[in-house]
Image (spheres, grey):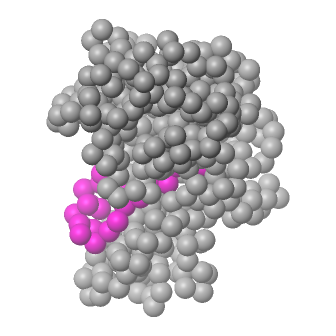
């Protein structure tokens, strides 16, 4: 209990980059929906957004509240100030009542709905709240949020004019420790690897034994956990369901369904392949990443941060870390920038491609402290192929020098890119 109290107190001291965007949405929309994996800090954020005297907070993890809202939703939802409902997917009746209340009066900021499943993908939600809600995804703590800065990396400037950033930049101190610990508040705000491992083990058990079954029936939890481990070992890889099916000993339709469940419950992200024709992105094989690098390492059986040195999984987790920062930044922008990856049939690739403000910027990520011209070759190929639409590329590295390393390619320190 002392640990939980300490974590809650420390969580309240860390501002979140998404908070200003949600506040702005609450000033214009009657319903704001905040989703994200369980334990990313949604409840803490809700209480920070709305003063206690103006908030009626209902959590449907509480069975008495769940029973009441199923029987008499209108009575619980009628309030002068903001009503927040946590894990609202557990009571579709509440969504019907929310729709009815909003239709009676579209006062901005009436409802804050949160959940650990992607509510925008649920038919009951999309139909009930069409035209009435703004949607946001809350990710685990970014490197900059963990440092207390309440922001993501300076991607607006990086994707506009990286030369404006100061040099020398900042490296990411103890890089593999960052990857190993991840960003779940309860796992990282209490020091010690033993606590982190214990917490993550409990997190996976809770997900399998309760959260997953709330969303869909799974016949064999051992099979599902084995699939999670196989997927974690393939962090950053292109999704090959045939290979996963073989290695996990599961039918391919089952693998397909389980991956969809992991995505629907916000545990994994599938990054599409870049193509100028957006329809083609949907048929290109996506890359698989996790909602948290610490969780991915835990599921893959990594017990020490030192195991991530020397490339391999450490390199893919570094890409995962940068992706999560990009996604957290994209949530603060309207319209939301697209994040893809790029790979050619001949093996040329860019870890990520960000499409924003009518242009595309390729990004390559290296853990080395001294990037070489050779490291920029694939970026140069991308820039050559897409011409004026791609004004420059970014090569992220773990040194301190921010410099133009090649024509139209900027080398940027990871610490600077991640907002330190």
Residue, far top:
346
As drawn, 335 above or below 358: below
Residue 208 in picture, x, y percent from top left: 52, 40
Q: Is residue 99 magenta?
A: no
As drawn, 24 above or below 127: below
Residue 244 in picture, x, y percent from top left: 39, 18
As drawn, 238 above or below 333: above
Q: Is residue 120 magenta?
A: yes
As drawn, 338 above or below 227: below
Residue 92 seen = yes
In this view, the residue in front, 172 or 87, is 172
Q: Which residues are magenta?
A: 119-141
Point out the image quarter for the C terminus.
Answer: top right
Q: Residue at x 38, y 20 (%)?
A: 380
Residue 290 seen = no
Is 261 displayed left or right of 205 in the figure?
left
In this view, the residue in front, 407 or 63, is 407
Residue, far bottom:
80
Residue 211 in picture, x, y percent from top left: 49, 48
Residue 87 in picture, x, y percent from top left: 46, 61
In this view, the residue in front, 277 or 362, is 362
Q: Residue at x 30, y 84 (%)?
A: 106
Res 348 → quadrant: top left
Q: Residue at x 25, y 82 (%)?
A: 103
Point out the image quarter for the N terminus.
Answer: bottom right
Q: Residue at x 71, y 45 (%)?
A: 188
In this view, the residue in front, 261 or 312, is 312
Res 148 → quadrant: bottom right
């Amino acid at each position: 209990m002392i640990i939980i109290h300490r974590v809650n107190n420390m969580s309240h001291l860390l501002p979140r980059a998404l908070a200003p965007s949600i506040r702005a949405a609450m000033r214009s929309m009657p319903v704001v929906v905040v989703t994200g994996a369980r334990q990313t800090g949604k409840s803490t954020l809700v209480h920070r957004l709305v003063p206690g005297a103006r908030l009626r907070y209902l959590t449907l993890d509480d069975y008495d509240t769940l029973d009441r809202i199923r029987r008499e939703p209108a009575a619980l939802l009628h309030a002068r100030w903001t009503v927040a409902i946590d894990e609202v997917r557990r009571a579709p009746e509440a969504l019907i009542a929310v729709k009815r209340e909003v239709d009676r009066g579209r006062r901005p900021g009436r409802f804050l709905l949160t959940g650990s499943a992607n509510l925008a993908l649920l038919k009951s939600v999309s139909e009930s709240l069409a035209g009435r809600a703004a949607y946001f995804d809350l990710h685990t703590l970014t490197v900059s949020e963990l440092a207390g800065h309440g922001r993501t990396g300076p991607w607006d400037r990086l994707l506009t004019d990286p030369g404006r950033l100061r040099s020398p930049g900042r490296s990411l101190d103890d890089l593999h420790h960052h990857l190993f610990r991840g960003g779940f508040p309860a796992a990282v705000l209490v020091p010690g690897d033993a606590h982190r491992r214990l917490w993550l083990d409990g997190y996976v058990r809770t997900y399998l034994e309760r959260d997953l079954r709330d969303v869909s029936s799974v016949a064999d939890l051992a099979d599902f956990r084995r699939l999670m481990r196989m997927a974690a070992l393939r962090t950053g890889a292109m999704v090959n369901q045939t290979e996963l099916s073989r290695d996990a000993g599961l039918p391919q339709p089952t693998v397909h369904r389980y991956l969809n469940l992991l995505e629907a419950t916000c545990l994994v992200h599938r990054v599409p392949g870049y193509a100028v024709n957006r329809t083609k992105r949907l048929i290109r094989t996506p890359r698989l990443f996790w909602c948290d690098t610490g969780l991915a390492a835990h599921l893959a059986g990594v017990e020490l941060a030192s195991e991530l040195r020397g490339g391999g999984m450490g390199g893919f987790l570094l890409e995962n870390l940068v992706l999560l920062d990009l996604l957290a930044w994209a949530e603060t922008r309207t319209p939301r920038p697209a994040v893809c990856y790029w790979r050619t049939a001949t093996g040329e690739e860019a870890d990520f491609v960000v499409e924003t403000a009518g242009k595309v910027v390729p990004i390559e990520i290296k853990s080395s402290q001294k990037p070489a011209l050779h490291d920029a070759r694939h970026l140069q190929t991308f820039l050559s192929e897409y011409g004026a639409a791609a004004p420059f590329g970014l090569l992220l590295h773990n040194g301190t020098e921010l410099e133009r390393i090649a024509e139209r390619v900027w080398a940027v320190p990871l610490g600077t890119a991640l907002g330190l």
